[in-house]
Image (cartoon, grey):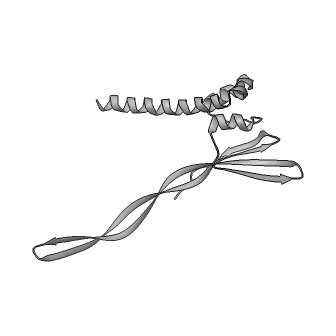
Amino acid sequence: MKRVAWVMALAVFAAGCASTLEKRRREHAAVYAGLTPELRAAVDRGEVQLGMSPEAVYMAWGKPAQALTNETSQGRWVTWLYQGNRLKSYRYWTHQSYVGGGYVWSHPYLATSYYPMEYVSAEVIFQDNKVAEWRTLPAPVY
């Protein structure tokens, strides 16, 4: 029974991801139709390739967390930054108290808590509205 529940949950998750990609493709249907077969296949796989337009990157990876603009002697560059999340653990000393029989006992122990940390997980650099370079970055090690 648990296996069926996990399969159902995975199917719902996969359908949600597919519908998000499909929604982005519908938003830019004309651009998607005008892509080469290779770039269309890359968008369908959620991949970025050199020469892609910003609309194709948006369809493949979604909206960036930040867009930075830079102007050099070679022209205007736009960098899209994508965010990732990771849980960071931290340990601290605390105490546990017990009450009973008119006495209060307390003893220290080491506890662990977690909080989310955001980091730049990928960047895409455009020159002349085409991907000039891109890279994914590893999650930081805490």
Give the left or right position of residue 104, taking residue 81 as reference.
Answer: left
Q: Is residue 95 above or below residue 63?
A: below
- In this figure, what is the number of numbered marks? 0
- Give me the residue at 30% from left, 32% from top: 2
- Residue pushed farthest left? 101
- Give me the residue at 70% from left, 27% from top: 32
- Residue pushed farthest bottom? 103
Foreground: 97 or 20? Answer: 20
Pinpoint residue 34: horizontal percent, then vertical percent. 75, 24
Residue 102 visible within the image: yes
Residue 52: image quadrant is: top right
Q: Quadrant of the N terminus?
A: top left
Pinpoint residue 106: horizontal percent, then vertical percent. 23, 74
Foreground: 81 or 47? Answer: 81
Pinpoint residue 12: horizontal percent, then vertical percent. 44, 31
Residue 58: image quadrant is: top right
Give the left or right position of residue 132, taking residue 75 as reference.
Answer: left
Give the left or right position of residue 105, taking residue 34 as reference.
Answer: left
- Give me the residue at 72% from left, 26% from top: 30
- Give me the residue at 54% from left, 30% from top: 19
Residue 140 visible within the image: no
- Residue pushed farthest right? 73
